[in-house]
Amino acid sequence: MTHQSTAVASRTGNNPFLRTVSALSTLAGWCSSAMIVLAVAITCQMIFVRFVLNQSTIWQTEAVIYLAIGATLIGLSYVQKLRGHVNVDLIPLSLSKKARYYMYLLTLSLSIGMVAVLLFYGYEHWKLTFDKNWKSDTVWGVRLWIPYLSLPIGFALYLLQLIADLVAVVLKIDKPYGLEDV
């Protein structure tokens, strides 16, 4: 087992909810990576078509933009799972163990609340584009509900991972901010 998989396993224990959310976040990470690879491949194809074949492109730029945005949103939960976001731990390090615990509960609860609001409005926006069958005003005319689906899916997965992180600390499976007692 690698160091990374050992670290993640130590944060889920045998808890089925935590293990399921961890697996979903990993799957989201793979999907996000695939979207980035696909965007790069489409960019290469677009360059070939424009500069070698001297033809115009129709759908490539729009597809790359949607893939990049989708990869960012779908990948949120995976980055959270790996604690890949930029962390400033000066304040948590200077606090006592108990104060650090309560600060973690507060900050994660606020984060969960904010992401829940983003999920609500992201779903509303996606539903509107789906119900009205909106299309982009480009030559390609993609149905916008397809790329906008990354809003509710990405925020739902991110919300689940934040809740799992909170549960792991409350159940003493993980430490607040991933910091060992100092």
Image: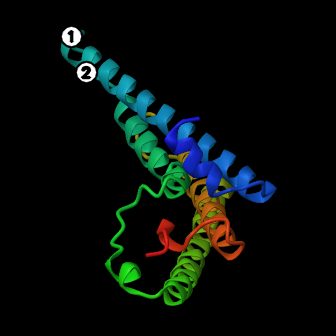
- Residue 52: mark in rendering: 1
Identity, as a three-letter code, of the amino acid under mark 1: Val
Give the class, few, some or many, for how many residues have Cα within 10 Å of label 2's Cα (few <14, many ≥20): some
Vertical order, 98 against 129 (above or below): below
Residue 84 at x, y percent in the picture: 42, 55
Vertical order, 110 against 87 (above or below): below
Which residue appears farthest toward the front when viewing the image? 182
Taking the spot 72% from the left edge, 72% from the top edge, the residue there is: 171
Q: Residue 57, located in which quarter of the rendered image?
A: top left
Which residue appears farthest toward the top when viewing the image? 53
Vertical order, 8 against 62 (above or below): below
Taking the spot 58% from the left edge, 45% from the top edge, the residue there is: 6
Residue 97 at x, y percent in the picture: 51, 84
Q: Quadrant of the N terminus?
A: top right
Left or right of 127, for residue 39: left
Give the class, few, some or many, for how many residues have Cα within 10 Å of label 1's Cα (few <14, many ≥20): few
Q: In which quarter of the image is the C terminus?
A: bottom left
Identity, as a three-letter code, of the amino acid under mark 2: Ile
Can you see residue 146? no
Q: Which of 140 and 181 is in front in this view?
A: 181
Can you see residue 12? yes
Q: Residue 81, located in which quarter of the rendered image?
A: bottom right
Distance from disc 1 to disc 2, alpha carbons, whole Å, reads: 8 Å
Taking the spot 43% from the left edge, 49% from the top edge, the residue there is: 69
Taking the spot 51% from the left edge, 58% from the top edge, the residue there is: 80
- Residue 172: mark in rendering: none
Q: Nearer the viewer, residue 64 or 102?
A: 102
| Residue at disc 1, secondary structure | helix
Question: Given contact means CB atoms under 8 Å apart, are the residues at marks 1 and 2 in contact?
Answer: yes
Residue that carries the numbered disc 2 in the rendered image: 47
